[in-house]
Image: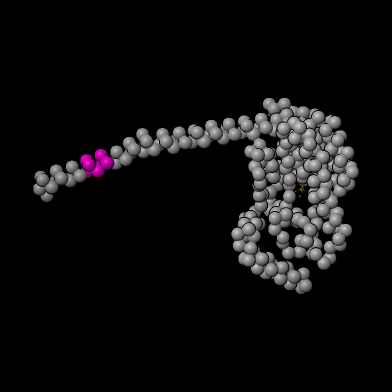
Amino acid sequence: MGAGETHVKSELRRSMSYSKLRSMDLTSWVILPILLGCFGIYSLFKVLQKLRNSAYVQDAVVVITGATSGLGKECVKVFYKAGAQLVLCGRNEEILKDLITELNQMRKGSIQTHKPHMVIFDLADIEAVTSAAKEILQLAGKVDILINNAGISYRGTILNTKISVDRMIMDTNYFGPVALTKALLPSMITNKRGHIVTISSVQGKISIPFRSALMDKSTAEGRTPEEVANIVLRAVGERSKEVLIAGIVPTVAVYLRALAPKIFFSLMAARARKERKIKDS
Ligand SMILES: NC(=O)c1ccc[n+]([C@@H]2O[C@H](COP(=O)([O-])OP(=O)(O)OC[C@H]3O[C@@H](n4cnc5c(N)ncnc54)[C@H](OP(=O)(O)O)[C@@H]3O)[C@@H](O)[C@H]2O)c1
């Protein structure tokens, strides 16, 4: 190997390590600070968003229907911890009293909590709903957030479901919440503040074979009521217009129903045939 060749090789090595250094410089002096800056801005944005969300719920008067069990009960706990002034609605006074005792015994964080009220009424009884709305306004003075959560579930075929069952479901799940919302809406308009949350099922969006009237508990897909209650709290804070809490299959089904209805209906027909076979065997 000649001296000239060695010199060329060492020059080459030097220029390669120089370009490596240059690219490292570029990473450490340009890209890294940009990434750190973006992360910083994002974190700051998230902290501000969290503060804004919790300020929105703190001290707000929140009415929760169906507070005696399941999701409603968990919503009561998360909104209570978030500092809301709660009005718990349900049919069973004893359960609501026990829940209030449970809330009073809960470990309080730094957020100031409020003594909850309770109002007992049956959502399927429109007159009772109207007087309950008056009682809510007398007790709390106003309503900032109404969570229409109460509902009944039913599973059955169209042929085997009596119209009285459809009527009962519509009275509880539709007309009751509509009547309550209508009765509370004027005070929200007067106060220039009001937020209405409606909890429904995926089956409010798509129909599934052999569930003629409403939902089925198995559609919860492993989400605990506590997890869903925290999602509801976040959605309220963020003023989300719609939140779909479902597993991958129902989520795809909802989008398929909107974007490719033909495929959706042929899949549902196949599912209906399969379920019919299982039922008949
Ligand atoms: N669990 C699920 O898989 C699922 C899935 C999708 C959507 N959802 C929706 O989430 C909401 C809560 O479901 P959940 O599973 O927590 O139900 P849940 O445990 O059965 O609780 C339903 C609540 O509604 C109340 N309620 C029923 N009928 C009423 C009436 N006529 N008047 C007043 N209150 C009445 C019940 O009160 P009582 O104690 O007096 O009966 C209870 O507090 C429902 O709207 C449901 O459609 C649930």
Q: Is residue 169 left or right of residue 191?
A: right
Residue 144, how many percent across, how many down? 74, 34
Q: Nearer the viewer, residue 175 or 200?
A: 175
Identify the magenta region. Answer: 13-19
Q: Is residue 188 shown to the viewer in this render? A: yes
**Residue at (72%, 52%) from the top-left corner?**
201
Figure colour scheme: one colour
**Residue at (18%, 42%) from the top-left corner?**
11
Q: Answer above or below: position of 2 versus 107.
A: below
In what quadrant of the picture does the C terminus appear?
A: bottom right
The answer to which image quadrant residue 110 occupies is: top right
The answer to which image quadrant residue 191 occupies is: top right
Number of numbered callouts drawn? 0
Residue 247, how many percent across, how many down? 64, 54
Residue 173, how many percent across, how many down? 80, 50
Q: Nearer the viewer, residue 279 or 213?
A: 213
Q: Is residue 91 shown to the viewer in this render? A: no
The answer to which image quadrant residue 241 occupies is: top right
Q: Is residue 164 left or right of residue 259?
A: right
**Residue at (20%, 44%) from the top-left corner?**
12
Residue 255, how many percent across, how many down? 62, 57
Q: Is residue 126 left or right of residue 60?
A: right
Q: Nearer the viewer, residue 178 or 239?
A: 178
Q: Is residue 66 magenta?
A: no
**Residue at (81%, 29%) from the top-left corner?**
141
Instruction: Kindly report the secondary structure that dominates the magenta region of the rendered protein.
Output: helix
Q: Is residue 15 magenta?
A: yes
Q: Answer above or below: position of 54 versus 259.
A: above
